[in-house]
Image (cartoon, helix red, strand yellow):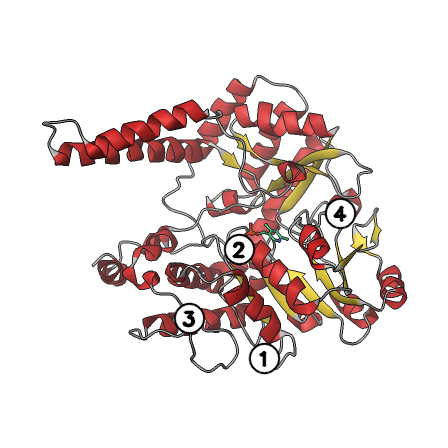
């Protein structure tokens, strides 16, 4: 399946766990809980908890010692992680982002969810210069799919990035099943920019096209949105998927899609935004004729459970962006450029030299065949303590390589000098075939000075404050 080389989020696994091992584990847990005769229940509970703790030890140790250069993941702060633990999230929350009569989907409640949703949508609208903010999609894929289904019906068409140009994989199969025709954005390979004139021709030749969606997940450049809007026939919905660059937009180093003519900006909240695994759809215009259809596809049509426990964590993650987003986004950019230039100087082939390698959190390295790139990312680099994903590099004539992202390491406090060190370590593996175990020791050494419990651009340094103590006292009451 092609998903293997796409934006899976999941990275290399230390080792595959066989079905037998899983069965044995389940049996052991059932035994623990059911208990042998004469074992005190408290001991059995302790055993279950200890088994669980060992998994967390495994994971935390792995994270502490690995360079996370996967472009699609981040480290949420402690408050973001803890706030999902309140009872409040146990209530369904359906309210759509347009005025609606309370009906079958409304439940009596304390008013807390509505208040939290008000806070979250307020900050979301502000960060994305939008009139609405639907917090309900459970992921970036659902958000995209709701936009597709809400704007296109059977016989209509939509345009998005081809996979080789970084397009996301959530749409084409769905479009096929729904009878919607798929077209690809015409690209200029050298610049990695959309060819706006050819896009205009495409839309003129296929008047059934109702949606243009910029859904890149391999993304080095900002696209000329204002020109794209100007080239589209009236009524064509222009959607910008900011799953990857959400914090760069909200932090002000990339432009606001809604101000350049996008009808909606949407995306998930766990790539450059260091929030929970959740998503949003924000419309420029609260009276937009497609708002209701898109929103209803999210919920109740594709989801009924929108995970209300994540409203407060999303709010805190967006508050971190509101407070620190400008510095965070600027450092991401500086780090991506330091990494790209560092790799280039080491002799690694980095995509995009003509435009300064990157305008985002991503750096693309060209290594050769698909098998080559796969072996590097899941083999040598993983053994060297470096998490990356392999991709077909956009604009590289079918060559494959690595997609690196600097956002997580930026949260861990790495800056330009450390990024140059990272470049040296990656080059050692990619180019000089250094012994992975030796590089792994250097990686662990570097990361020792960047602990996971004090993330930059986060509320982590306030987690022991009286205000946080009062909040957490209520969450865990
Ligand atoms: C990652 C990604 C998604 C999918 O987000 P999930 O939260 O994993 O569902 C959607 N669109 C783009 C452009 C992405 O990069």
Crowding at mark 3 (Cα within 10 Å: few <14, some 14-19, many 20+): many
Q: Quick check: 458 above or below 345?
A: below
Ligand 1 within 8 Å, label 4 CB: no
Q: Are marks 4 and 3 in contact (CB under 8 Å)?
A: no
Asked whether 204 or 91 is in front, the reply is: 91
Tell me what residue is drawn at x 66 percent, y 20 percent: 432
| One can see residue 103 in this view | yes
In the rendered image, which residue does mark 1 sit on?
A: 286
In the rendered image, which residue does mark 3 sit on?
A: 117
In the rendered image, which residue does mark 4 sit on?
A: 165
Crowding at mark 4 (Cα within 10 Å: few <14, some 14-19, many 20+): many
**N-term mark: 1 or 3:** 3
| One can see residue 347 in this view | no
Check residue 153 in the rendering and tell me which mark sits there, or answer none.
none
Q: Are marks 1 and 3 in contact (CB under 8 Å)?
A: no
Return the x and y of residue 338 as percentages of the image width and height: 63, 42
**N-term mark: 2 or 1:** 2
- Judging from the image, what secondary structure is the residue with disc 2 in? loop
* Picture quadrant where residue 283 is located: bottom right
* Picture quadrant where residue 226 is located: bottom right
**N-term mark: 3 or 2:** 3
**N-term mark: 4 or 3:** 3
Q: Quadrant of the N terminus?
A: top right
Ligand 1 within 8 Å, label 2 CB: yes
Crowding at mark 2 (Cα within 10 Å: few <14, some 14-19, many 20+): some
In the rendered image, which residue does mark 2 sit on?
A: 139
Disc 1 from disc 4: Cα separation: 32 Å
Q: Are marks 3 and 2 in contact (CB under 8 Å)?
A: no
Asked whether 366 or 276 is in front, the reply is: 276
């Amino acid at each position: 399946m092609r998903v293997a080389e796409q934006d899976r989020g999941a990275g290399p696994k230390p080792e595959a766990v066989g079905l037998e091992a899983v069965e044995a584990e389940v049996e052991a847990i059932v035994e623990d809980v059911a208990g042998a005769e004469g074992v005190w229940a408290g001991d059995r509970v302790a055993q279950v908890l200890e088994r669980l703790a060992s998994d967390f030890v495994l994971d935390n140790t792995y994270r502490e010692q690995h360079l996370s250069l996967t472009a699609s993941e981040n480290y949420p702060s402690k408050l973001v992680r803890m706030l999902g633990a309140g009872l409040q999230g146990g209530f369904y929350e359906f309210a759509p982002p347009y005025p609606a009569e309370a009906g079958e989907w409304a439940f009596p409640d304390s008013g807390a969810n509505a208040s939290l949703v008000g806070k979250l949508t307020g900050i979301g609208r502000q960060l994305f210069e939008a009139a609405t903010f639907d917090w309900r999609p459970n992921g970036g894929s659902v958000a995209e799919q709701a936009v597709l289904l809400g704007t296109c019906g059977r016989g209509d068409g939509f345009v998005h990035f081809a996979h080789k140009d970084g397009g996301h994989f959530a749409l084409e199969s769905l479009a096929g099943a729904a009878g919607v025709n798929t077209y690809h954005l015409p690209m200029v390979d050298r610049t990695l920019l959309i060819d706006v004139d050819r896009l205009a021709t495409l839309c003129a030749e296929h008047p059934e096209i109702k949606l243009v969606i910029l859904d890149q997940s391999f993304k080095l450049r900002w696209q000329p949105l204002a020109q794209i809007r100007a080239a589209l026939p009236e009524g064509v919905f222009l959607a910008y998927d900011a799953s990857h660059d959400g914090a760069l937009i909200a932090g002000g180093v990339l432009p606001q899609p809604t101000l350049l003519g996008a009808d909606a900006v949407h995306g998930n909240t766990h790539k450059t935004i260091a929030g929970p695994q959740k998503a949003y759809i924000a419309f420029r215009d609260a009276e937009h004729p497609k708002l209701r259809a898109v929103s209803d596809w999210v919920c109740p049509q594709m989801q009924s459970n929108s995970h209300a426990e994540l409203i407060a964590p999303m709010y805190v993650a967006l508050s971190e962006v509101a407070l620190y987003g400008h510095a965070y986004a600027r450092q991401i950019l500086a780090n991506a450029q330091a990494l790209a230039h560092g790799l280039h100087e080491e002799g690694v082939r980095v995509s995009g030299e003509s435009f300064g390698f990157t305008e985002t959190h991503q750096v693309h390295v060209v290594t050769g065949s698909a098998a080559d790139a796969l072996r590097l990312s899941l083999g040598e680099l993983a053994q060297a303590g470096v998490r990356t994903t392999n991709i077909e590099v956009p604009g590289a004539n079918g060559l494959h390589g690595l997609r690196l992202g600097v956002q997580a390491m930026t949260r861990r406090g790495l800056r330009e000098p450390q990024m140059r060190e990272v470049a040296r370590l990656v080059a050692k593996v990619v180019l000089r075939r250094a012994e992975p175990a030796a590089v792994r020791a250097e990686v662990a050494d570097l990361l020792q000075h960047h602990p996971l419990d004090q993330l930059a651009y986060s509320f982590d340094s306030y987690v022991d404050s009286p205000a946080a103590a009062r909040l957490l006292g209520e969450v865990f009451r």
